[in-house]
Image (cartoon, rainbow, N blue to C red):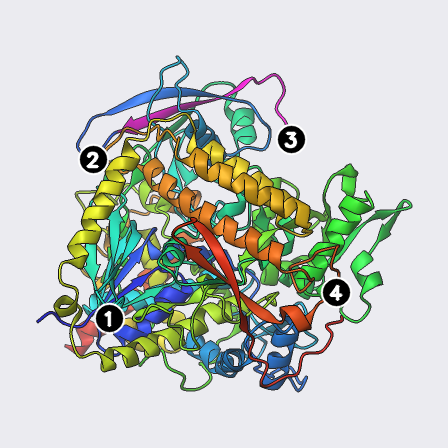
Amino acid sequence: MEKTKVVVVGGGLAGLMSTLKIAEKQIPVDLISLVPVKRSHSVCAQGGVNAALDTKGEHDSVDQHFYDTVYGGDFLANQTPVRGLVENAPGLIYAMDRMGVQFTRTSEGLLDLRRFGGVKNKRTAFAGATTGQQLLYALDEQVRRQEVLGLVTKYENWEMIDLILDDNGVCKGVVAQDLATMEIKEFVADAVVIATGGAGMIYGRSTNSVINTGSAAAIVYKHGVPFANGEFVQIHPTAMPGDDKNRLMSESARGDGARVWTYKDGKPWYFLEERYPAYGNLVPRDIAAREIYDVCVNMGLGIDGKNQVYLDLSHLPDDYLDRRLKGIMDIYQTFHGDDPHKVPMKIFPSVHYFMGGIHVDWEHQTRIPGLFAAGECDYMYHGANRLGANSLLSAMHSGTVAGPAVVKYLGTLTKTAAESIGNNAELVVRKQQAEHDKLTKMDGKENPYKLHEEMSDIMYRNATIVRVNKNLEETDVKLQEFQERWKNINVTDMGGYSNQTVMYVRQLRGMMDLARVIVGGALRRNESRGSHYKPEFPKRDDENFLKTTLAIYNEKTGAPDFSWEEVDTSLLKPVERKY
Amino acid sequence: MAVQNVQYIKLKIKRRDNPSSPSYWQDFHIPYRPNMNIVSALMEIRKNPVTADGQQVNPVVWECNCLEEVCGACTMLINGVPRQACAALTDKLIEKYGDRPIELAPLTKFPVIRDLMVDRTKMFDNLKRVHAWVQVDGSWTIDRGPRLSEKDQRIAYEISHCMTCGCCVEACPNYNSKSDFVGPNAIAQVRMFNLHAIGRMQADERLEALTGPGGIQDCGNSQNCKQVCPKHINLTAHIAAMNRQANAYILKSFLDK
């Protein structure tokens, strides 16, 4: 009889935390990751992680963190799980501190805290402006220790390409492909955790890393698990536009004193401070992004006539900046050339984060028994808009929920995976091998990278800050054309070894599926809420849309069917959101 | 910052189809655009994989992920220097080297998988050898972590930027396939863990590893590592600090016998 085993897919914060929680219970984990886990996208998170530590004499509290998160998310997040998130936060940060995360300190050696958007208290613990990198490394180190102890086996440079289900529809592992040798292999397991992050690559240029295609989430979606709230895509107000990607300039810059401005009538105009006196530059991201867009696009007041405004740190002392924000200042100087100590940075909003994702229950299990999802790829904590520094928190926290939930689930099983799957693993491997062989022979006319560019252009135009139904309808038609053209792709790479193009063609198909989820959800939600803004329907409409959007894949049409689910508002009555 | 009178970004790329096949060079000319970097230039080749002499070839394979010099994936030799391809701006390269082709080659200290992609597993294995973690009782909540002075935090924070990218070991004359030297990055990591109030409790285990075969005594003090570190980690200073700790440890072990 095979021993109990779990597969975790994804080695960012959520995946590593899940792995750690399971391995600590002496249950072996196979950890599958597209990249060496230390290179996961969590490294890109900068500004910090929220926890009501209340060490700044401001009477901050878990209740206030809860209120800010639910209110900031425009009441679309289920409140019971959010309550768990904020309650867990302080203990979680202290545990990470014990693991050696190099948090920035106060003069008495405690964790320093900074202020973030949509919040009036200092609640964000941070490690300079590289908090995600530091947190990821601490978990990477802990998981490496579990590897030495023999509890974790890493499969780095492997890509999950399918799920294995038994005859009862229970998840019993995954099929993955070695990105070097191209070998396709089954990983039979008693439970699977998907922790594969967001899908910013759908939009081409975003603040995301190139692996963030969402293709794993798309695989889960095509197995019938609903994709929830797909239309809620966070646009970060301050990114440095680039040729190959938009590089994030952390919200912590504003938390530490940066001001956003442009010229009006020949004079600096601090439009966020003027329009939002209570929160100033620290309004939530959806609002700041819309205001910058308005100033540049509608008023034509961008710097040098382009779509950009200033994010200005130049009035702050050098030592203060180097101690707290060096990470982003280095990025700006390396990639732009200007020194942000001396001149203001030029920024514009960019696609950044997926509030929506794989539908899960409050213990992070999907509708497929034995299949769990954690981190940005799930939909759980952020409603219609995520507050800054809540993503590192939700990534880690969801691992601390999913990991133990997996352990509990394993206790309910009466048969091992090996006993219950019959020849299903073999069949899926064979099916995916055939699929791979077919992909390698695609010799049509379309270059996959160019096709992707066309898709991301139209997604950027029509499914970001401002959404108009006519444009969304057009986009959905276009997406169907792209799906047709996908069939006429030329893989261009004839190599049998480490063929990145073939894998990319697979991922592109998944991106197209999720793009339709985003656009379809946006089209049907005739209101404005959080990051989803429709000038035709400028108000929030709780009567009709205080609901979670569920996109369920229809195998016959190849398109999503849409339905709705009630939101848990058991703890806090929805009120109008004003800043 | 556009460069004047340049029509193409010229790349000369060292290629290899798989680990056991021979390597060869190919030239590519990419229509000039300002503000590109080596990764975005390689992305252009994917869209049109044709060499400078018009030959249709397989697209070039390389590793990259974050594109902002924090993940460590895209290390390669660019005109012979190990560095991150994403942060190698083509305008700056052209400014420095003129119009001659920019040479891209895989790191030489690691097995090549394909083209510019190498297998750096050995670096992660070396982190295991030096016990590069804080040995907590578990990941659960206990209480507030230990206090740490701002001064120690500044030293440790610098070291904790290490991306395990491989630049330092590529430049190190003592790190190669014949030696089992742990490398400059692993030595610096030990300093970071030994500074931590909990990590310090296992300092002896790490020092035992650092004073054993392939340990700190294999450092030849060439100081190349510090020059190429993309995160500007003062590796030579950290190695010097660890030398002192290692010597103290050896003396203490001797006296304790």
- Give, as a single range, the part of the protein colored magenta: B1-16
Residue at numbered disc 2: B19
x%, y% of residue A277?
82, 68
Q: Are marks 4 and 3 on the same chain?
A: no
Q: Residues within 10 Å of mark 3 (few under 14, many from 20)?
A: few
Q: Disc 1 or disc 4, which is closer to the eye?
A: 4
Per the image, the residue denoted by label 4 is A539
**Distance between the alpha carbons at the discs numbered 2 and 1:** 36 Å
Tell whether position B15 is magenta. yes
Of tags 3 and 2, the one toward the viewer is 2
Amino acid tagged 1: Glu
Horizontal side, residue B23 vs residue A219: left or right: left
Q: Are marks 2 and 4 in contact (CB under 8 Å)?
A: no
- Badge 4: residue crowd in 10 Å (few <14, some 14–19, many ≥20): some
B230 or A182, which is in the foreground?
A: A182
Q: Nearer the viewer, mark 4 or mark 3?
A: 4
- Pick whichever of labels 2 and 1 is earlier in the sequence: 2
Mark 3 or mark 2: whose residue is earlier in sequence:
3
Residue A305 x/y as whole percent: 78, 38
**Residue positioned 31% across, 81% down in the render:** B137
Q: Is A492 displayed left or right of A52 in the figure? A: left
Give the residue drawn at x 40%, y 24%: B49
Protein chain holding label 3: B
Badge 3 amino acid: Met
The furthest residue to the right: A265
Q: Considering only order in the chain, which callout, 3 or 1, is on the residue closer to the N terminus?
A: 3
Residue B14 sits inside the magenta stretch: yes
C-alpha distance separating marks 4 and 3? 44 Å
Up/down of B79 relative to A113, above or below:
above
Measure how far apart labels 3 and 2 are at the Cα level: 39 Å
Q: Which residue is mark 3?
A: B1
Q: CA distance from mark 2 to mark 4?
A: 59 Å
